[in-house]
Image (cartoon, helix red, strand yellow):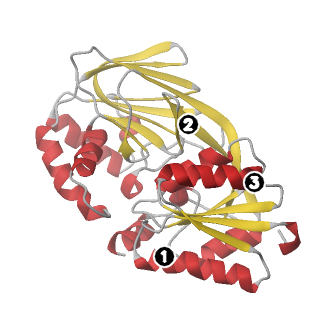
Amino acid sequence: MKPKDGYIAMIANPKSGASSSGRRDQQFRHYLVDQGYDVRLQLTQSLEHAKDLAVDAGMDDTCSLVVVSGGDGTVREAAHGLVGSNKPLLMIPCGTENLLASELGFDERLKTVIKAFEGDCRHPLDLGQVNGQIFTCMVGLGFDAEVVHMVNSNRTSHIDYFSYAGPMWRTYWEYKAQPVRVEVDGLEIFNDKGMVIVGNISRYALGLHVLRHADYGDGQLDVCIYRCASRIRLAKHMATTLIKKHVDCGDVLYRQGKTVKVTAAPRHNHFVQVDGDPGPALPLTVGVIPQALEVLIPPGAKPAGIRTRIVRAIG
């Protein structure tokens, strides 16, 4: 990519992440300007605004690249706005978890973003849809979704990893798994009490390898279902997931498919999370948009490890 190819649209969420993250996107902008690129920075006012800005950039023939600085929510909406365009997306992770960026091999260093830009290594990215809502990472139903709802109901400002500690502890002691029915590509695979994760990337919060076979560009969704009717079973699932042995357990189901339907009896109260934000109510219809857009990734990239996530946690 060269300056003559067109301007670079930079969409930045000024409320995402720590001050160090903010400095990183400013530094990358200065780097681009020094290299002779025309960089047009626009700050988001909301997640919907991020999508609108991406739509405008995607429709502009004089735009060559869209750079998004923010967390998973900002990246998700910008990616949604670029569906159907030929503009590649480059992300600067500035949120709390940055699930997609971590999966694509980005860490906390500016030089990794520069490496991705200079390497011009492009990879197709699938997007998921749940009840018409776009997601880039995953949909969760059960324990994790209850934690997300509790964090968001008490949220007054920017959150970090430590914002989840109390809600996780409280949810563990109060959690009661509810019956749920799951179909994959029209075939019922589960009808019992349990937790469900449907996603497009292999690693979840804190680098947990929940959907270990997931590939964000293979045109399929991965489904992991934990059969769970007690706190003891919940603790066991946490332990086996931590050591990457959960898929080998008899009380865990793992499937791949293009369409997933999740239903439950009306009397049961299920929480749903989408990319770490509260999601829609059941029933859920989850699908995939194969190779919806292209993303720039660091050459030879591998998903970010626990060290990167710890650095982000402490800022």
Q: CA distance from mark 2 to mark 1?
A: 28 Å
Of 212 and 78, the residue lying toward us: 78
Please tell me how crowded label 1 is: few (under 14), some (14-19), or many (20+) other residues with Cα within 10 Å: many
Of 267 and 214, the residue lying toward us: 267
Residue 239 drawn above or below residue 133 = below
Q: CA distance from mark 3 to mark 2?
A: 19 Å
Q: Earlier in the sequence, mark 2 or mark 1?
A: 1
Q: Earlier in the sequence, mark 3 or mark 2?
A: 3
Seen at 63% across and 41% down, the residue is 126
Q: Which residue was labeled with disc 2? A: 128
Give coordinates of residue 224: x percent, y percent.
42, 33
Q: Which residue was labeled with disc 1? A: 22
Q: Which residue was labeled with disc 3? A: 87
Residue at disc 2, secondary structure: strand
Mark nearest the camera among 2 and 1 is 1
Residues at discs 3 and 1 in contact (Cβ within 8 Å): no
Q: Earlier in the sequence, mark 3 or mark 1?
A: 1
